Image (spheres, helix red, strand yellow):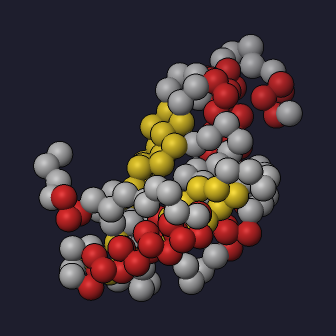
């Protein structure tokens, strides 16, 4: 895809997580100001054409971890997240993700089978499965799952399926 260098804003390496998040959000705000990125019709968030995410084995997407306070963030566009007090990462918040025109979530591998199934059937509390919270307001959500990630669905549809998938 031909991209203009001005349209690419990497997260700044070498900064603290909080400083990197602030710097990244500032860069996005500059893109809105220059109209490189449009503003969402229903929120004041940037409306990216596409956000590509992957489902993690712990049920997270991006660095939006289950039951983390950042899941309820409404004013920041970018946040610094630390899982279990360890490594910091920078993530877009749900309001920005949900303002995108298109969001794709990829589930790949056997280790994502349970979180993928739980997300799809919505049996768990919503904060414990951040992927359930990805619901673009004025956009499209598309899932791609390989056979391993979808294996619990495949077994549930077999003639000899048991209630083992309900655990």
Q: Is residue 88 left or right of residue 19?
A: right
> Which residue sits furthest front?
14
The answer to whether one can see residue 33 in this image is yes
Q: Is residue 79 above or below residue 54?
A: below
Residue appearing at x 64%, y 24% in the figure:
110
The answer to whether one can see residue 133 in this image is no
Q: Is residue 61 above or below residue 7?
A: above
Q: Position of residue 119 (x, y in %)?
A: 66, 47
Residue appearing at x 63%, y 45% in the figure:
120
Q: Is residue 163 above or below residue 39?
A: above
Residue appearing at x 64%, y 76% in the figure:
73
Between 36 and 10, the one nearer to me in the picture: 10
The C terminus, quarter of image: top right
Between 83 and 13, the one nearer to me in the picture: 13
Q: Position of residue 67 (x, y in %)?
A: 77, 60
Q: Is residue 56 left or right of residue 167?
A: left
Between 130 and 1, the one nearer to me in the picture: 1
């Amino acid at each position: 895809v031909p991209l203009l260098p001005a349209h690419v804003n990497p997260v700044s390496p070498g900064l603290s997580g909080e400083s990197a998040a602030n710097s990244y959000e500032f860069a996005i705000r500059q893109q809105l100001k220059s109209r490189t990125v449009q503003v969402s019709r229903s929120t004041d968030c940037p409306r990216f054409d596409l956000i590509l995410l992957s489902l993690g084995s712990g049920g997270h997407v991006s660095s939006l971890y289950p039951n983390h306070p950042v899941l309820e963030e409404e004013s920041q566009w970018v946040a610094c997240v630390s899982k279990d007090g360890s490594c910091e990462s920078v993530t877009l918040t749900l309001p920005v993700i949900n303002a995108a025109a298109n969001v794709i979530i990829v589930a790949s591998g056997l280790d994502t089978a349970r979180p993928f199934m739980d997300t799809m059937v919505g049996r768990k509390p919503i904060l414990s499965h951040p992927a359930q919270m990805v619901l673009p307001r004025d956009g499209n959500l598309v899932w791609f799952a390989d056979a391993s990630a979808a294996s619990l669905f495949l077994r549930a549809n077999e003639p000899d399926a048991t209630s083992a998938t309900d655990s």
